DNA sequence: ATACTGACACGGG
DNA sequence: CCCCGTGCCAGTA
């Protein structure tokens, strides 16, 4: 059926989970890794998101995944970071400096998807 | 098997 | 409060 590059199982699981992150909320790489049963594979999560192909990126809200410090991880290429920040703000997330208040916007995997935006 | 990441935690300044 | 460097780990190419 599908042709094109095979997607690694782990990466596939990452995409599936990230897809459930509601707009206006964020998760950390570590949270995603833990939810997948690999609490130490946070870096691999970042890898998977980095390998996201363009069509798939449309379905996967990669911008809602940030690091444990609440900051946007820069991959040497600054462009994506700017875009990510813009997308987050567009969803109603207020950044404090270059940081997101995880306390306020963090979404927990397993929580009801329609739980909407955390406020205040 | 080697090298390269979009990480995380911890310690020190 | 902030920033930076170090050690560690796991998955992908």
Image (tube, coloured by chain):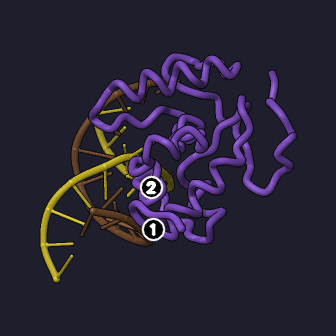
Chain colours: A purple, B yellow, C brown
User: Residue at 29% across / 31% down in the picture?
Assistant: A77
Tell me whether circle 1 and circle 2 mark residues in contact (CB < 8 Å). Answer: yes
Q: Which residue is mark 1?
A: A8
Q: Is residue A102 left or right of residue A5?
A: right
User: Residue at 55% across / 55% down in the picture?
Assistant: A30
Quadrant position of residue A17: bottom right
Q: Is residue A112 left or right of residue C3?
A: right
Q: Residues within 10 Å of mark 1 (few under 14, many from 20)?
A: few
User: Residue at 56% across / 61% down in the picture?
Assistant: A33
Q: Quadrant of the N terminus of chain A?
A: bottom right
User: Residue at 33% across / 38% down in the picture?
Assistant: A75
How many numbered marks are there?
A: 2
Q: Earlier in the sequence, mark 1 or mark 2?
A: 1
Residue A28 x, y percent position in the rendering = 58, 46
Q: Is residue C7 left or right of residue A97?
A: left
Q: Mark 1 and mark 2: span between their CA atoms?
A: 9 Å
Q: Chain of mark 1?
A: A
Q: Chain of mark 2?
A: A
**Which element carries disc 2, helix, strand or loop?**
helix
Q: Which mark is residue A32?
A: none
Residue B2 x, y percent position in the rendering = 13, 72
Q: Nearest to the eye among marks 1 and 2: give it.
A: 1
Quadrant position of residue C4: top left
Q: Which residue is mark 2?
A: A48
């Amino acid at each position: 059926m599908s042709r094109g590059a095979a997607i690694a199982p782990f990466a596939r699981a990452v995409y599936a989970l990230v897809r459930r992150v509601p707009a206006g909320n964020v998760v950390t790489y570590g949270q995603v890794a833990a939810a997948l049963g690999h609490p130490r594979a946070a870096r691999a999560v970042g890898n998977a998101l980095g390998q996201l192909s363009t069509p798939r990126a449309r379905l996967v809200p990669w911008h809602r995944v940030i690091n444990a410090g609440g900051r946007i991880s820069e991959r040497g290429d600054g462009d994506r970071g700017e875009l990510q920040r813009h997308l987050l703000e567009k969803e109603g997330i207020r950044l404090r400096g270059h940081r997101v208040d995880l306390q306020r916007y963090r979404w927990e995997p397993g929580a009801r998807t329609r739980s909407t935006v955390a406020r205040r």
